[in-house]
Amino acid sequence: MNNTILVTGGAGFIGSNFVLQWIANADARVVNLDLLTYAGNRRNLQSIEHHSRHVFVHGDICDESFVASLLREHQPRAIVHFAAESHVDRSIAGPAAFIRTNITGTYEMLQQVLRYWQALPEGDQSVFRFVHVSTDEVYGTLLPGEPAFNETTPHAPNSPYAASKASSDMLVRAWHHTYGLPVVTTNCSNNYGPWQFPEKLIPLMVLNALEGKPLPVYGDGLNVRDWLFVEDHCAAIRRVLEDGRIGQTYNIGGNSERSNIDVVTAICDILDELRPDPSIGGRRNLITYVKDRPGHDRRYAIDATKIARELNWVPEQPFESGIRKTIEWYLAHLDWVNDIRTGAYLNWIEQNYAERLAQ
Ligand code: NAD
Ligand code: DAU
């Protein structure tokens, strides 16, 4: 078997960070399968465009014959499955794409990977892994003070996105339990860092605050997320791929719970320091409370003691330095941002915020 891994969704936010980190730190080739939806961007991978160990393939995980021939051609020893529709607000506005990619797409991957794995020689079968990258949102919501989600917390998804990811977790579990496919699942908390598409909370707030635009905080701003720097998440996935136990689930988190309003005020203060602008004034004044997300989960928190104990992984980047690094990254990559913020992106912003801001 080749020393090759197949990554799906490797032109998106976490996938591209993973592929960049992999090329810098590991010796295997990466075949990177991505449909290049609005969230996928080959510019994220520009620095490794001509790298001998990176092969980009434009294609759809839902296309079974395409996936089968890709597996035959490249003979990977592992799959890391990131490809998904990932934005909760978009899942509320239009769930169909989430059902297709996250459920049907994962099913098609599992079926094709199972056939490929069953045909491998025994020695190759035993080293093969399918790592399924999932989210803490499958566990539902917590009240303040409730214990964090651990790997035995039952799935109780609340948004169409979370339900589609929970379904994919169940399919992965069943393909292991029934057919013996060597899978490992990860459930991670909110990521932030370089290359995050500017419709998610942190990049959206950085860019609006930079430009003196309103900062739309949903509801009362007291919803809590557990923030993890994306490079820490990628390092955790590499550990899971190396030594994760087959059939197990590993929760991954930043141990960094913050309310949304605390995240937004931190961004305002750092930008006031890095890019003071008298025409904008103190950026906290831009904070605008807007209509809440329907079914908005109140709090997520991850208990990551299992991955620390078994795989010796802990997050390295504290939130305070990670958020500063992230803001500095966006300030240095405004050309990347401006390339993205064109027609389709602007239509989404209009659809999501016009009615909310009118409140
Ligand atoms: P993203 O939306 O930035 O990237 C998704 C990528 O998948 C894009 O490059 C897109 O083009 C590709 N894609 C979509 N449909 C496809 C298809 N049918 N075939 C092939 N490629 C397709 O997402 P992200 O934030 O990088 O998340 C990656 C994974 O990690 C997802 O599975 C998500 O559920 C999970 N996750 C994300 C977070 C987070 O905070 N962003 C946290 C935990 C888990
Ligand atoms: O928890 C992991 C999940 O984190 C991932 O599985 C998802 O793929 C990822 O998108 C993220 O989901 P969230 O819904 O938590 O992320 P988002 O950036 O959309 O929102 C973070 C919080 O900020 C959430 O409570 C909603 C709030 N919010 C978001 C936006 C875009 C606002 O208050 N205003 C906004 O404009």
Image (tube, helix red, strand yellow):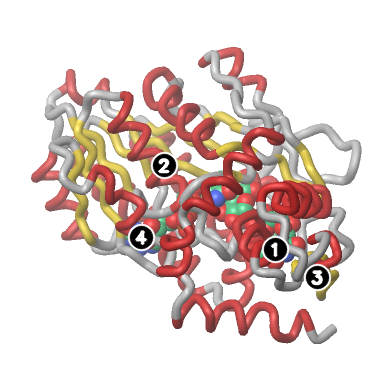
Residue type, mark 3 in image: Asp
Cα–Cα span, label 4 and label 3: 29 Å
Q: Position of residue 189 (x, y in %)?
A: 63, 41
Question: Circle 4 — which element?
Answer: loop
Mark 1 surroundings within 10 Å by alpha-carbon count, few (fewer than 14), some (14 through 19), many (20 or more): many
Image vertical order of residue 90 relative to residue 15, above or below: below
Q: Which mark is residue 292?
A: 3
Mark 4 vs mark 3: which is more N-terminal? Answer: 4
Residue type, mark 2 in image: Asn
Q: Nearer the viewer, residue 72 or 87?
A: 87
Residue type, mark 4 in image: Asn
**Quick check: marks 4 and 2 in contact, CB under 8 Å?**
no
Q: Position of residue 74 (x, y in %)?
A: 13, 41
Image vertical order of residue 347 relative to residue 9, above or below: below
Identify residue for label 4: 41
**Residue 169 visible in this rendered orientation of the protein:** no
Mark 3 surroundings within 10 Å by alpha-carbon count, few (fewer than 14), some (14 through 19), many (20 or more): some
Identify residue for label 2: 17
Question: Circle 1 — which element?
Answer: helix
| Disc 4 residue: CB within 8 Å of ligand 1 | yes
Cα–Cα span, label 1 and label 2: 25 Å
Mark 2 surroundings within 10 Å by alpha-carbon count, few (fewer than 14), some (14 through 19), many (20 or more): many
Identify residue for label 1: 209
277 displayed left or right of 171: right
Query: Which quarter of the image is occupied by the C terminus?
Result: bottom right
Cα–Cα span, label 3 and label 2: 31 Å
Q: Position of residue 340 (x, y in %)?
A: 44, 69
